[in-house]
Amino acid sequence: MRKPFLAGLCALAIAIIPAGAALAQSAGGLASLRGAGVEENVPVEQVFQQETRRFNRDYRQQPPLIPHSSDQYQIDLRANQCLGCHDWTNAGDRGAPTLSMTHYLDRDGREMDHVAGTRWFCTQCHVPQANAPALVQNTFESSASR
């Protein structure tokens, strides 16, 4: 029973694939997401560099923005390179801001000497800062401007 089903399925696929390819060819070819043809050179918009000065926070309890590049930082289940400078044991020597004490509390509110697993992946909340335009139109106002 299984062999006839597989044979029928293969025959159907052999019949449909060329028809699909012909339909794709007649659809007008490929185009990039930018709307240009695949072969066309599309000028790249301005690249916004990361700002080194610290940005002010826009609302209370906003996670601080990262004022340096973090592209090559390893943050996975085994390692977190951010802690090399920002953990309480290293921050003084490195001249880096120390993590908030909330990063050292477990789910039950008990203090620990190491970063809690719930705060391990820094880039869940903290992002590199850049002076770039908003990606979408919005009406956000800083809480300080009210």
Image (cartoon, rainbow, N blue to C red):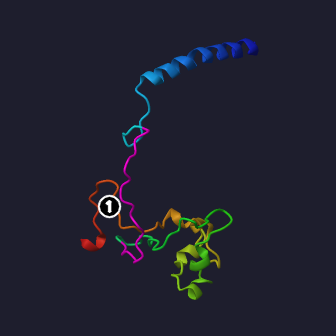
Is residue 10 visible in the rendered image? The answer is yes
Residue 41 on image: x %, y %: 40, 45
Secondary structure mostly taken by the magenta-highlighted segment of the chain: loop
Query: Residue 68's spot in the image, x, y percent?
Result: 48, 73
Give the magenta range: 38-57
Q: Residue at horizontal 65%, vertical 79%?
A: 113
Residue closest to the eye, 17 or 30? 30
* Identity of the residue furthest to the bottom in this view: 93
| Residue 142 occupies quadrant | bottom left
Q: Nearer the viewer, residue 145 or 52?
A: 52
Residue 17 location in percent, x, y?
57, 20
Q: Nearer the viewer, residue 82 or 88?
A: 82
Question: Residue pushed farthest left?
Answer: 146
Q: Residue at x 70, y 14 (%)?
A: 7
Residue sitting at x 36%, y 59% = 46
Q: Quadrant of the N terminus?
A: top right
Q: Is residue 16 magenta?
A: no
Q: Residues within 10 Å of mark 1 (few under 14, many from 20)?
A: few
Q: How many marks?
A: 1
Above or below residue 72? Residue 100 is below
Horizontally, residue 106 falls left or right of residue 31, namely: right
| Quadrant occupied by the C terminus | bottom left
Badge 1 is on which residue?
133
For residue 110, say whether it is visible: no
Q: Is residue 46 magenta?
A: yes
Q: For residue 143, what is the image quadrant? A: bottom left
Q: Return the x and y of residue 94 as percentages of the image width and height.
A: 57, 85
Say what secondary structure mark 1 lies in.
loop
| 41 vs 120: above or below | above
24 relative to 18 in the view: left or right: left
In percent of the image, x 38 and y 43: which residue is there?
A: 34
What amino acid is found at the position of numbered circle 1 in the picture?
Answer: Pro
